[in-house]
Image (cartoon, helix red, strand yellow):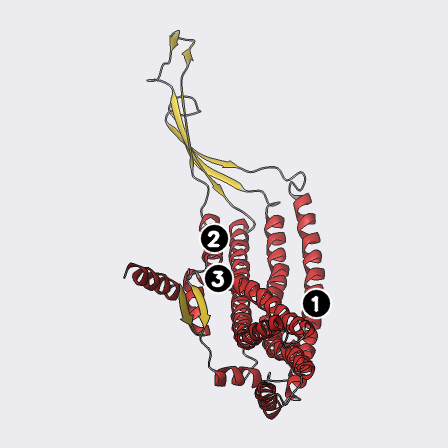
Amino acid sequence: MNKFSGLFIVISSFMAAQQKMSLQDCEKAFQENNLQLLAEQYNINMADADILQAKIWELPQLSGQINAYNPEDRKVFDVGRAKGAQVTQLIYMGGKKKNEIAFAKSNKELAQLQFSQLLVDLRSQLRSTYFDLYYEKLKLENTNRQLGYMNDLLAAYKVQSAKGNVSLKDEVRLQSIVIQLNNDKIGINKNILEFEQTLKVLTGVTDDIEPELSDSEAIDILAAQPFGDETELQKKALENNADYQYNLKLIDNGKLYAQWQKSLNVPDLNLGAGWDQNGGTFKNEVNLLVGIPLPLWKSNKGNVEKANFAIQQNQKNADFQKLNLETKVQAAYKTWKSQYDQLAQIKSDDLNNMELVYNGMLNNFRKGNVSLIEFTDFMDSYRETALQIYDMKNGIIQSAEQLNQLVQTKIFY
């Protein structure tokens, strides 16, 4: 009973570590749990704090004076007869505060675009990894099916080879296919582990994720086509791609920064009031205090020039990003179209025929109607073709996801 209980616990633990999740479930978990996304959100919060800080004026300055030494009465700290006080406030001129606030608000817009781009990149990685895992699981299932039969066949041939009923060469031929299948399985399992690890990091789900995708859903995803040709997709990308919009916004941001720096050349005004008990022309006189720097030269000239150069640099970067985005969309569309057309040439009847031939070869080999050489040649060809078909299907989805990542609006219908 203890052995059975222990086995039950092991099986239960294994089953508990697996969690079936649809793509929508994964995206929901990603939105709620992804640590990179949550951390990036704080940049927007910090930008809000910068806007708040930009709105705050300098504090008023309060100063006072008392007598330190009265030479007439030879008294030290004659506070009762000589003291005064002043209050001054810095008044910003030239629209400094308005320009500083506008620049801070522009920085927040940049932070929001950075967040949007990170969201797109991580979601695209999530979706790509999800489909990678889905097709690797199918490849593993297919490989295990072949291995199950080939291992049984190899075991039988080893018995017959030991008895001298079949040649060692036949046994080695079968062993070669088993080794190839096991090598495929090792590579597939390695990929599965990597994809599962990536999904755990992206979704925050600690269990191994089992993709929950029906055959009909997979067929619909493969059959989806983008709305419009590459020219239309390029236009949509320029309108919606957050990374490109970020570079455009940098130009506006640079102009606001330059305007702010120019306004810093305008002298500010110190305005205040002062009271003097006995040191002025009149007793207890109240005076208006006005102070302003003498604009003998532009104290912020270097920063203004630097800001203007930054505008030009941002413009060149935006031009580069535009060209780069257009070429990427063009390449991604052509890649998708090529893969889509290639798979479209393989009809569903062809795939069904391949499975029929596979099952027929197994039955005929068992009955002795097919030689070992014919059988092993077919199995080797089937093994490679099965893996290639799964890779072709996954390739279409991956190229479609790349288009989605670049265009960043709904394009597949």
Residue 132 percent location from the top left of the image: 55, 70
In the depicted view, which residue is nearer to us: 402 or 340? 340
In the rendered structure, the answer to whether residue 98 lies left or right of residue 274 reads: right
Q: Earlier in the sequence, mark 1 or mark 2?
A: 2
Q: Residue at x 67, y 69 (%)?
A: 325
Q: Secondary structure at mark 1?
A: helix
In the depicted view, which residue is nearer to us: 132 or 144? 144
Q: Which residue is under mark 3? A: 202
Is disc 2 surrounded by few (<14), some (14 to 19) or many (20+) residues within 10 Å?
A: many
Tag 1: amino acid = Asn
- Circles 2 and 3 in contact, beta carbons < 8 Å: no
Please, which residue is most extreme toward the left here? 1
Q: Which residue is under mark 2? A: 51
Is disc 3 surrounded by few (<14), some (14 to 19) or many (20+) residues within 10 Å?
A: many
Picture layout, residue 251 above or below residue 305: below
Q: Earlier in the sequence, mark 2 or mark 3?
A: 2
Q: Which residue is under mark 1? A: 324
Residue 353, by quadrant, is bottom right
In the rendered structure, the answer to whether residue 345 lies left or right of residue 186 reads: right
Residue 307 percent location from the top left of the image: 66, 51
Q: Residue at x 60, y 57 (%)?
A: 253
Q: Give the position of the N terminus as an image quadrant.
A: bottom left
Q: Secondary structure at mark 2?
A: helix
Residue 26, by quadrant, is bottom left
Distance of label 2 from label 3 (alpha carbons): 32 Å
Tag 3: amino acid = Leu
In the depicted view, which residue is nearer to us: 314 or 7? 7
